[in-house]
Image (cartoon, rainbow, N blue to C red):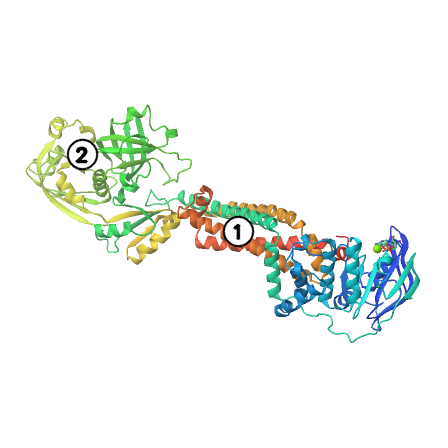
Amino acid sequence: MIQLRNVSKFYYSKGMISSGITKVNLDLDIGEFVVITGESGSGKSTLLNVISGLDTYEEGEMLIEGRETSHYSGADFEEYRKKYIGNIFQNFNLINSYTVYQNIELILLINGVSEEEIKKKVPDIIEKVGLSEHMNQKVSRLSGGQRQRVSIARALAKDTSIIVADEPTGNLDSASAEEVIRLLADIAKDKLVVVVTHNFDQFEQYATRVVRMNDGRVIEDKVITRRNLEGIEGGPLTGKLSNKSKFKLGVRNTFNIIPKFLLLLVVFLFVTLSVSGVYTNYKETQSATSEFGYNSFFQNYSDDRIVVKNKDSSVITDEQMRQIGELSGVKTVVKDDIMLDKNVDIENEYLSFYGFVYPIDSLETDIDEGALPSKDSEAVIATDPEMGEIMGEPEDVIGRKADLYLEETGTKLTDLSISGIVYLNTEDSDSDGLFSQSKLYLTDGKMAELRAYSYMSASDIKIEVGSRDLKSEADYMQYRLIPMKGVAKGTAIVPDEFNDYYSDGKAAGKNIKISAENMYFSSKASLKTSQTFTDKNYDKLIGVDTYDEHMSDIFISQSDYDALFDKGTYQISVYAKNSHEADNVAAQLKSMKMQYLPLKDAVSNEFDVEGITGIVQVPFMVLLVVVVFFIAYFVVRLILKSRDTYFAIVRMLGMSKKDIKRILDIEMLVVVSIAYLIFIIAVVLISNDIISFEYIKYLTEYMSLKGYILLYLVLLLMSYLISGRASRKLFAASAMQAYRGEV
Ligand code: ADP
Ligand code: MG
């Protein structure tokens, strides 16, 4: 079977040549139980390694079944080992975290034996070495003798014709050693078993042949008994590790050492949270830049606001508003939508407020000072104390009359009083616009009143006086229409210059025709001038001394004013629960056949803020992910360090680097998927308010389905790269060390 002809092996180290074995001649055959013995350093291991193809030789010739091997390459020897050699080691080289069954199964999987056959074969082999009782026990719980029997079983499972063992009893007590030797002798009936020992006495009674060595030379080669060779059954296994087996081993390795699994899980949870944090942060900045982008039509354009109207610009009915209010993802419906884009000033000696108008229904927080409005002339302000809009104590502001200026319409209301204050912390609240974050909350009645003013300013108003058309536009109308108590329906009080518009110099008693037109409606009124006013009679006629503000206004009754401008709701705004829900609400409005404009889509970025985002933020984001990657990688490396032995052993058992990497890939993939799954479960629980976790809640605000899918793909990629780097490092400590028992 194996013939050595004058084989010599030299070691070169530090420029010195020492001889491992010198001119060895041996013929070994199937059926022999050869024991190589000698002093330490006599070349026993070297000889065994040459025979088993682990070491090359420099001189002579070794023949395997008559074939010369002196020209063999590394790959040829690897092939030889796989086909012919089963190894047994002094230190067993078993996977301690696997059971006895799994250790035997592993070698069969690596060699492509089918599951079915494995199920039949493994228990038989285990029985042969007398470990049936321990079949499902982890190797780490077995005694040394039992372990060596497992490693013999593993060598048997591979079914090669040669089994080599270097000091197989070196770590065993004498009773265990005796059992192991008997087992090897038994095996040797139909195989060639070559054993190295410095303690020949233990083997004496079983060996069929003894080779004694000294100083690298064979000094004695004695055949003790010669056996009759029976027919040799079976043969070496030649199959390959299947994909299914790789998956099976990957999953097994994930869970077989629980603390290791938990550590990896923690690492990947950290990676999951970090990556989604980076993504959220990016999304948040993007949405913040779009908030601070510039929109030329709406001023109050938070990204959860959607402006809605009927396609034919008809009045939105109460029923429609009710339906919209019930859509999923809707937070509030604002009826007096036009008001949302109006800035108001509120002034008195203790207050200098500037902000947007909101209906009181949309106030979500509690009042910090004072109370909710109890009548239409009362309002609540929300302001950041840092901004200094309140000058004095809260008591100075609450209950005190203040002037309300409606910007751009030039309207001033003098009957407002503040009933309550909400303190904002604008540092962490969302900004609703470019100009101010302060908010004025009004009753529905007050909103309607202001809306009428706004429609007036948004309308084209024509005033026909006698033979003249006094046309004016919203931004600079010369004559405004002001509703005033005490003016009778159908009449108007006009400035005395109106007298000049008539040939007889008298405006009183004459008709004036007013028409208003805007994008939603047109309306007309025909009024009779009842009086004209001058600075002299103004106070008496109107009842307040506001002549300076109203010297060129036309006073009409509230009901005529409403008939002209309060024509119902044509446009509303819907606030979604968050900007992500806004898309969902928009989709539902679409199916309701409403016309809608999500303001987050309407923002035009004049300064190309998103371009800047792209340039500055994306590289930063990538950098963060890379940092997270390396942190994770180094921790995973540390955790996997305990696995170097595992990888060395499977390598020694004949698994290819590619397959080992694949198995590690699968392990990482399983862990990362579990981490991701835990994250998703947490997200679901948190978004349903079952548990609370502020950071994850924050994460979910900006995550969309696309985000979740992207996150998973990034995680998979990261785990793949980590596994790739880790396995490359692992292979640096090579299989050869494991072969030689140096691991
Ligand atoms: P044994 O197994 O009988 O103790 P070895 O085969 O290990 O002996 O060693 C035989 C000789 O070869 C010794 O002199 C030893 O110092 C030398 N030797 C073994 N391995 C190496 C090596 N890797 N490098 C250099 N010298 C070695
Ligand atoms: Mg040795």
Q: Locate residue 646 relative to residue 399 in the image: left or right.
A: right
From what the image shows, is residue 627 above or below residue 533? below
Judging by the rendered image, the residue that carries numbered circle 1 is: 675
Which percent across, then down, holds residue 529?
A: 9, 38
Q: Amino acid at mark 1?
A: Ala
Task: Determine which quarter of the picture holds residue 490.
Answer: top left
Q: Residue at x 55, y 48 (%)?
A: 271
Which percent across, then down, holds residue 135?
A: 65, 60
- Find out whether the residues at labels 2 and 1 contact each other: C-beta distance under 8 Å: no
Asked which secondary structure carries label 1, the reply is helix
Q: Along the polypeptide, which appears first: circle 2 or circle 1?
A: 2
User: Badge 2: few (under 14), some or many (20 or more) residues near its Cα, within 10 Å?
Assistant: some
Which percent across, then down, holds residue 231?
A: 78, 76
Asked which secondary structure carries label 2, the reply is loop
Quarter the N terminus occupies: bottom right
For marks 2 and 1, give the CA distance. 72 Å
Which percent across, then down, holds residue 506?
A: 7, 35
Judging by the rendered image, the residue that carries numbered circle 2 is: 552
State ligand 1's quadrant.
Answer: bottom right
Residue 457 in view of the camera: yes
Q: Residue at x 60, y 45 (%)?
A: 631
Front of the two marks 2 and 1 = 1
Q: Locate residue 357 relative to residue 46 in the image: left or right.
A: left
Q: Amino acid at mark 2?
A: Ser
Task: Determine which quarter of the picture holds residue 23.
Answer: bottom right
Q: Locate residue 526 relative to residue 448 in the image: left or right.
A: left
